């Protein structure tokens, strides 16, 4: 008894013998020809399914391209417990920034001008991590500097209650 038959209680129908059990009428070259026809049919149906899924994905896909000097937001991880770019937690912002694009590196990567507190992060990011920033004159970007004490601690001051 084959292991498949022992495990599932029925005979295995392989690509060579997709016939019903006890129906072996094809022998020799006819068996090989029948198997190749079925394999070609499977390949054709797989290509049809792939092209259908590709057309569904292409409807939502948009190619992003930025120019040097544009401002973009940088995506941070929204997963709880994962620390990325100094942001952690479920309620942390999805995007930080905006940051200026310094140069285009390759076809889909950009070098950003990061602030000094993010100096330990590599400044080149894939286009999927970036989102366009539409400038608004009323939006003032302000990075707060923290006054560190001698033992590298600081005192938190509430802004408003």
Image (spheres, rainbow, N blue to C red):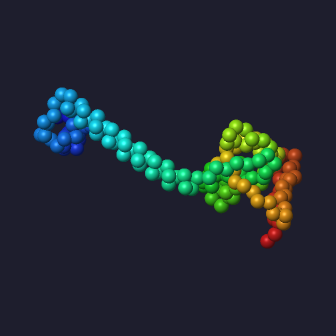
Would residue 82 be seen by someone viewing this image from the given angle? yes
Residue 58 appears at what percent x and percent y?
54, 52
Question: Which quarter of the figure is the N terminus placed in?
Answer: top left
Give the camera-side residue of 150 and 23. Answer: 23
User: Which residue: 49% across, 49% down?
Assistant: 54
Side of 70 relative to 1 (left or right): right
Residue 52 appears at what percent x and percent y?
45, 51
Give the camera-side residue of 2 and 100. Answer: 100
Q: Quadrant of residue 94?
A: bottom right
Would residue 129 be seen by someone viewing this image from the given angle? no
User: Which residue: 57% across, 56% down?
Assistant: 60
Residue 29 appears at what percent x and percent y?
20, 28
**How many marks on residues?**
0
User: Which residue: 70% across, 54% down?
Assistant: 131
Give the camera-side residue of 85 and 4. Answer: 4
Residue 7 appears at what percent x and percent y?
23, 41
Side of 101 relative to 30 (left or right): right
């Amino acid at each position: 008894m084959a292991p498949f038959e022992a495990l599932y209680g029925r005979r295995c129908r392989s690509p060579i013998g997709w016939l019903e059990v006890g129906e072996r009428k094809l022998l020799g070259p006819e068996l090989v020809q029948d198997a190749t026809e079925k394999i070609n049919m499977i390949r054709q149906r797989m290509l049809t399914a792939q092209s259908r899924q590709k057309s569904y994905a292409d409807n939502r896909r948009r190619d992003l391209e930025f120019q040097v000097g544009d401002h973009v937001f940088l995506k941070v991880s929204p997963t709880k417990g994962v620390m990325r770019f100094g942001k952690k937690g479920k309620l942390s912002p999805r995007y930080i920034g905006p940051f200026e694009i310094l140069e285009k590196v390759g076809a889909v990567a950009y070098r950003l001008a990061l602030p000094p507190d993010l100096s330990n992060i590599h400044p080149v990011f894939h286009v999927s991590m970036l989102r366009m920033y539409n400038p608004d004159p009323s939006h003032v970007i302000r990075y707060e500097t923290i006054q560190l004490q001698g033992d590298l601690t600081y005192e938190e001051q509430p802004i408003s209650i």
